[in-house]
Image (cartoon, rainbow, N blue to C red):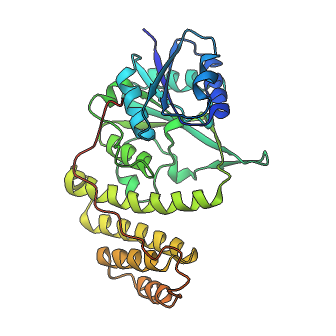
């Protein structure tokens, strides 16, 4: 039985997924399986993967359903004592798995170990994510309501046991799925920050797509917080006043982003939502007045609607 199951969701990025797979196969820790879930790719992803000759690779094709469905299917297929995720556009240095697993072996009371994140820009320059207050060890649930921990799925290694009754929420296909699942996991186990290794995350070059994702991350992050508190036992960890301020702050940031992008209707609705959660923030009234003064004719998203609340349960399928 492999010690580590590495789950790689892939969709229409044959070149980058090949490099991601190679970074796993080149690990100094060799007792592993590589579970590649092809989420309905229409390019040459399958043929590229099939050309890689290594008995540790297990390839599965499924209908397109989004990254969370691919990760969940990988969890159903995994056989290892440890679980690690790697997105198709991320890379690991050779000692990555050895370093994280070694720390989990030494620290049995931790269920998750996570590493630093190095962002590789298109021009070859690098920057490191996370200030010291966002890189902590211990029980981190309350931290998600203050300065959120700087944790990426591709920069973590899990004991398989922490996933026994936890899955990625497949309703969150466009944004905030990482924030949501780590918040839920934070009530089950302690996190161990390991500064001795890192993830290489290749920066997305599509600025418009990054802006849209930033907007969605803020909104769906707020929805995740509300569900966590009101339906998943979050009231045991945080007060309602802190929850409301956190959610209001997220809606305000999303509103300001939409205001800058001249999405007038979206900005106004988001500022109203922020006020409904925390009406004592005087800045919000200036924000909504400023957005209201923007031209209706120049509104780039005149039909934008506020997303509905998340259902109280976590949606999971096995994929097809």
- The one nearer the camera, 108 or 75, is 75
* Residue 125 vertical position relative to residue 316 in the rendered view, above or below: below
Q: Residue at the front extreme?
A: 42
What percent of the width, then of the height, locates residue 236?
Answer: 21, 52
Relative side of 12 to 139, left or right: right
Depth check: 302 or 260 in front? 302
Q: Where does the image place residue 252, in percent across and percent down from the top left?
A: 44, 73
**Number of labelled discs?**
0
Tell whether 227 sits left or right of 179: left
To which quarter of the image does residue 12 belong?
A: top right
Horizontal and vertical percent position of residue 251: 41, 70
Quarter of image, res 159:
top left
Give the vertical position of 249 relative to 287 (above or below): above
* Residue ID at (50%, 86%): 296
Left or right of 87 in this view: 67:
left
User: In the figure, 84 relative to 1: above or below?
Assistant: below
* Displayed quadrant of residue 315: top left
On screen, residue 270 above or below 147: below
Q: Residue at x 57, y 20 (%)?
A: 98
Residue positioned 25% across, 56% down in the render: 229
- Quadrant location of the C terminus? top left
Depth check: 296 or 220 in front?
296
x and y percent of residue 239 in the render? 25, 62
Quadrant (top left/top right/bottom left/bottom right) for the N terminus: top left
């Amino acid at each position: 039985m492999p010690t580590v199951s590495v789950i790689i969701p892939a969709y229409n990025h044959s070149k980058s997924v090949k490099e991601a797979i190679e970074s796993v196969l080149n690990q100094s820790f060799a007792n592993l399986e590589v579970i590649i879930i092809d989420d309905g790719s229409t390019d040459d992803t399958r043929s590229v993967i099939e050309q890689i000759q290594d008995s540790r690779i297990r390839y599965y094709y499924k209908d397109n359903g989004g990254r969370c469905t691919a990760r969940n299917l990988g969890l159903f297929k995994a056989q290892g004592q440890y679980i690690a995720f790697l997105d198709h556009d991320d890379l690991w240095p050779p000692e990555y798995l050895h370093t994280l697993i070694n720390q989990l072996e030494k620290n049995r009371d931790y269920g998750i170990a996570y590493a630093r994140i190095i962002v590789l820009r298109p021009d070859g320059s690098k920057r490191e994510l996370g200030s010291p207050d966002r890189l902590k060890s211990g029980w981190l649930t309350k931290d998600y309501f203050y300065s959120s921990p700087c944790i990426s799925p591709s920069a973590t290694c899990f004991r398989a046991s922490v996933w026994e009754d936890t899955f990625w929420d497949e309703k969150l296909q466009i944004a905030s799925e990482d924030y949501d699942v780590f918040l839920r996991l934070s009530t089950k186990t302690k996190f161990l920050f390991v500064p001795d290794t890192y993830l290489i995350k290749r920066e997305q070059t599509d600025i418009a797509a990054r802006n849209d994702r930033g907007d969605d991350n803020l909104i769906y992050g707020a929805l995740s917080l509300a569900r966590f508190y009101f339906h998943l036992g979050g009231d045991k960890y945080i007060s309602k006043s802190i929850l409301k301020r956190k959610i209001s702050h997220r809606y305000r940031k999303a509103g300001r982003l939409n205001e800058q992008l001249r999405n007038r209707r979206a900005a106004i609705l988001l500022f109203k939502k922020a006020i409904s959660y925390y009406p004592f923030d005087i800045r919000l009234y200036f924000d909504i007045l400023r957005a209201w003064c923007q031209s209706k004719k120049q509104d780039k998203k005149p039909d934008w609607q506020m997303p509905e609340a998340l259902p109280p349960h976590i949606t999971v399928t096995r994929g097809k």
